[in-house]
Image (cartoon, rainbow, N blue to C red):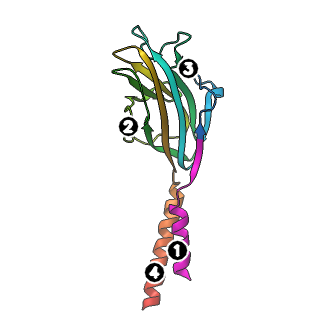
Amino acid sequence: MMNRLICAALFCVTTVANALTYVESVDLPDNMSLDPSASVGALDVGSNTVSGALNGVCILAPGGCNSATPGDGDTQDSFLLTVQAGTQLRSLVLSSVGTVGPKGFSANFYLTDESWAPTVNVFIPINGVSPNLLDRPLGPGVYSLTVFGQVAVEPGAFVLPYTLSLEVSAVPEPETAVLLLCGGLLLAIRRRQSAA
């Protein structure tokens, strides 16, 4: 009976939850801000995803593939994510499979915290999947994320579908770790006494 309870507890602990799933249905804002109306929600423990797409035009001028000129399309998406208290964002992977664009097209991903300190600033792997873009877990707070067309060698239209995969874990409280350790020690002592 005890073995079944331990197995059930381990299964519950290791099961991955599917948390926030956001799919862009209305165009996200084209500028970075901490405006709460641009929030896609709070991340929950488990696997979270945010998906969207840019559909714009690259021009051979300043701004390249991220122009604010009307008629150049949706060249940038900016939004907010919240990492809740007691959790941490430990992995952020970006996919851009299905991207098409003019010769030399590139795009950028930018992540800042509430103080506007840049946390991630990378070129998006075109038609690929990035490794984990975080060099350390990010704690609770509101983060601004931006995906935008960067430059191209030739002018022309581009389509950039993107998916952010965000893994969030609970931050164990020190008391919890001590309780688990004590419980494990008591279980080991009890087993040793039963075997004797």
| Magenta stretch, residue numbers | 1-21
Q: Which mark is residue 128?
A: 2
**Secondary structure under badge 2?**
loop
Q: Residue 19: percent from the left, percent from the top?
A: 58, 48
> In the visual, does 21 lie left or right of 122?
right
> In the visual, does 46 lie left or right of 109?
right
Residue 161 higher or lower than 67, as above or below: below
Residue holding disc 1: 6
Amino acid beneath label 3: Asp
Residue placed furthest toward the top: 61
Q: Nearer the viewer, mark 3 or mark 1?
A: 3
Which residue lies at the image location 54% right of the left edge and 36% below the top edge?
51
Q: Is residue 174 magenta?
A: no
Label 1, residues with CA under 10 Å away: few <14, some 14-19, many ≥20: few
Residue holding disc 3: 30
Residue holding disc 4: 189
Label 2, residues with CA under 10 Å away: few <14, some 14-19, many ≥20: some
Q: How much space separates mark 3 and mark 4, taking CA atoms?
A: 61 Å
**Secondary structure under badge 3?**
loop
Q: How much space separates mark 3 and mark 1, taking CA atoms?
A: 50 Å
Q: Nearer the viewer, mark 4 or mark 1?
A: 1
Instruction: Identify the mark nearer the N-term, 2 or 3.
Output: 3
Q: Residue 169: percent from the left, percent from the top?
A: 51, 50
